[in-house]
Image (cartoon, rainbow, N blue to C red):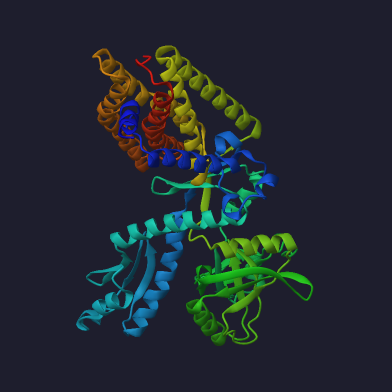
Amino acid sequence: MFALQLMKQITMPDFPLWKTLLVLGVTTLFAFLTLPTFLSDKARQNLPESMRDMTINLGLDLRGGSHLLLEVDFDTYFRDQRDILRSEVRSALREIKLGYRDMMVDGQQITFRLPENAESRGGTVEKLRNRLGFDYEVAQQDQQVSVSLTKQAYNAKRQQLIEQSIEIVSRRVNETGTKEPIIQRQGDARIILQVPGLEDPAQLKTILGTTAKMTFHLVNQAVSPEEILAGRAPLGTKLLPSEDASERLPNGLPYRYAVNSKVELSGEMLTGANATFEQGQPVVAFQFNSAGAKKFGEITAANVGKPFAIVLDNKVITAPRINSPILNGSGIITGNFTVESANNLALLLRAGALPAPLKIIEERSVGPSLGLDSIQAGTKASLIGLGGVVTYMILTYGLFGLFATLALVVNIVLLLGALAWFQATLTLPGIAGIVLTFGMAVDANVLIYERIREEARRGRSPVSAVQSGFKAAFGTIFDSNLTTLIAAALLFSFGTGTIKGFAVTLSVGILTSMFSAILVTRMLIAFWIRWAHPRSVPL
């Protein structure tokens, strides 16, 4: 019995049972994970619900779709904010009982002059600063006072605007049911949006081209129809066209409303919107959050009997008369809606009001045929690369080259399974990362085999040569793969778009190649030694 155990230890490398079970278990698991990717949509419905979405998604360059480069219009946002700031400054000056004159907008500032005796009221400007808060800078030179956002608050607001815009664009695109959109920041004012497989790019542009910037204004009833017809409006009032194309002025131009420039309430406080019907006509119902509901209630309570304009993208959707205070924070937008237009408006409002308009700077479309050509080219390149690697390994290392080939097949299964698990989006650079992985996967085998060959030439037995070869080559393999993994991590951190895709597939490929080259190859060699009892290493 002792002799039999000793013989097994001598004729078999150090590869315990638990390692064999680990290799077989991991390979089986990842092979199972690759299954949904190669099944049709109908066949995937028979899988467990948790696995139906575990597929490798094709990127824009492979599947076709739309590419948009968007730019956040900061100027429009800060212009509106200056109008709001002017109203707040006036209210604050009234509260602290400080007279003023010649208030105007000067670039990024609100400026006004104090009366001659204002300096004798020490601390009044300090009270204004305290009333507005730390985000605003109040400066005084003689009788001239200027109010503006601090540099820190201005930069923070720009950062917030771009982040909020990215979030809202993502929510809007996902509302359409589109899968795997690529949305990322470019520079300090632009957003890249790529939507693979979108069949109707015009729908995407319509949703994004409409800013859904909803505001509420009181209508200035003092402006006469003659002034509206002549295009004249007093200070603090602006003329906005009606959204309803059937409303016309006597000269045939779209009807215009004279609304106060002051924004009474912003659509950013909306929490929900949905299309519904009222008296058989499509309408859009909306709800405010608690702060918006309170403000909406105060406005409607103070202006009963007055028309209240609901403005969307500088067009008056409707201007209903406030018949009674609305204290529950909800309302209805009526207009010349169709079911489709009501649903689209509700979608935009539900996804969130963009804080600033978005301009489409660049637009590209990739057709499915071009994507198919890319897939065919990438598949061809992968097969050629795989064939070249397999041929070289078998010609150079014979039976051990065949073991490396089998390990490479396992590596491909692990790689595809991992990408499916993460529901990664595969692009052409991603395919390049996979092809590069083929070469790197057998690179470790080359190091191991060359070291085994050296040990065999020194007269070691096959078992001893194999054990020494794997042990000696491990440090070199680990170091080389670690440095490549660090480079891939840097590419992912600082790269954008397709560079990230390349970094992801390369990183996953490095990890799976380590597993296959070290464990899978060693397991196959261990089985061969136990079965064949070789007297020499065939290298």
Rendered view: 333 above or below 198: below
The quadrant the C terminus occupies is top left
| Residue 248 percent location from the top left of the image | 73, 64
The image quarter containing residue 83 is bottom left
Image position of 261 (left or right of 15): right
Name, please, the residue furthest toward the front: 1
Q: Is residue 312 visible?
A: yes
Residue visible at 31% across and 84% down in the picture: 96
The percent position of residue 480, horizontal first and vertical second, equals 29, 29
Q: Is residue 142 above or below residue 124?
A: above
> Which quadrant would the N terminus be assigned to in this image?
top left
Q: Quadrant of residue 302?
A: bottom right
Q: Nearer the viewer, residue 500 or 214?
A: 500
Question: Vertically, is 255 above or below 93?
Answer: above
Q: Residue at x 66, y 77 (%)?
A: 320
Q: Nearer the viewer, residue 40 or 148?
A: 40
Q: Is residue 233 left or right of residue 9?
A: right
Q: Residue 444: x and y, percent?
A: 35, 26
Give the answer, above or below, for where 302 lies relative to 528: below
Residue 119: image quadrant is bottom left
